[in-house]
Image (cartoon, helix red, strand yellow):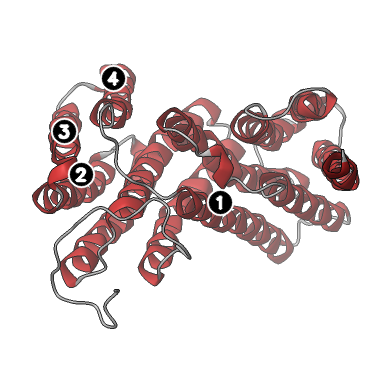
Amino acid sequence: MAETTPLWYRRMTSRSSDEGHRASTPLELFFDLCFVVAVAQAGSKLHHALSENHVGHGIVSYLAVFFAIWWAWMNFTWFASAYDTDDGVYRITTLVQIAGALIVAAGVPRAFDTADFGVVTFGYVLMRLAMIFQWLRAAHGDPEHRPVAVRYALGVFLVQVGWVARLALPEKVFLPAFAFLVVCELAVPAWAERKNPTAWHPHHIAERYGLFTLIVLGESVLAATLAIQAALDSGQAGAGLFSLAGAGLVIVFSMWWIYFDKPAHALLSSQKSALRWGYGHYLVLASAAGVGAGLAVSVDYDAHQAHISGTVAGFATAVPVAVFLVSVWFLMVCPHLRGPIAAAMPVTACLVLATPFTGAPVHVIAVLLAALVAVLVLDGRRNRLAEPDSVSE
């Protein structure tokens, strides 16, 4: 029976993967809200880098920073699904991870402006050291999964040594060293979970990812709203700004509809599908946040405050939207659907990538996504109407 009040310490044992009524805890929700501060910082700096025509540097810095945010969030989420004890020690350790995320957020400007990743690395390593402590607790309290927990703790520790050592390397090897360490990070769960994997909860994982996606989409709305406010305050906004704002809302609303069109927990049926789901969401979340930056760039261009062409401004929105569509299609459509409806998302993504050459890319993207949502709604209605017939047969 669950405790009515949290204890200071309780033995960390594995939770059941099929326990009923498993929902996100207030601590997990607080964790998400604090992490989205770092997402907002990364999105804001990407917006300004693109508007100032620092496209290559902005994209590389954004993807690197977002990896640190996403990977730390993801590791905590899967661990909590299997081992959340909600005792005092667990809460304090989680708060240390939150502090690390806020340090990462504080270091984002330096990473973008001067390629100084020192503060970001410190915050990231702090989060990961707290995660090592959690895995050592799990190894002590759950003998059945002790080998898995020990492999996690060892793997995470070794990679953190690599991240710290990377700071001493010359700038010219930044990308190769970063790519190598990313591969090492991604390899740790696949190695650790090979035998007797941890007991994560499918419904809980699907809800956690859905909630974080919601928050990231909300951050995109906020980013675009702040850009519109800045344009209005500067007096440079034209009449087209309001139609641009409306088209931006249609894009974000459609992305929400597309992501949540069908329940996702059934897709998490094996360890292989779990790795695909977890890793694939890097692109889902990074692109969702990138859409907000892209919309803000379009506002800057409309207000004559961007130092880029209209085509580049269009791609700032089109590329993340297309990546979002392809990622959601790969994770949620490909495993189960075939036929014309399964091709709707990649076809739409290709059309979205052509919109920067139309002269009104954001508006055309909004039309394309609204049409895709209509197709999904009609397909869902057709399936529901067919269900009684299939049952009677």
Return the disc, 1 or 2, that comes first in the chain's sequence.
2
Q: In whole angstroms, how far apart are the C-alphas of marks 1 and 3?
A: 29 Å
SS label for mark 4 = helix
Return the disc, 2 or 4, that comes first in the chain's sequence.
2
Three-letter code for the amino acid on which mark 4 is drawn: Phe
Residue 347 image offset from top left, x and y in percent: 79, 24
Q: Is residue 374 left or right of residue 304?
A: right
Q: Which mark is residue 125?
A: 2
Quadrant placement of the C terminus: top right
Quadrant placement of the N terminus: bottom left
SS label for mark 2 = helix
Return the disc, 3 or 2, that comes first in the chain's sequence.
2
Residue at x 72%, y 29% (from the top left corner): 337
Q: Is residue 93 left or right of residue 112?
A: left
Q: In whole angstroms, how far apart are the C-alphas of marks 3 and 2?
A: 18 Å
SS label for mark 1 = helix
Q: Residue furthest bottom?
A: 4
Of 56 and 165, the residue lying toward us: 165
Q: Is residue 182 above or below residue 247?
A: above
Mark 4 or 1: the one toward you: 1
Three-letter code for the amino acid on which mark 2 is drawn: Val
| Residue topped by disc 3 | 151
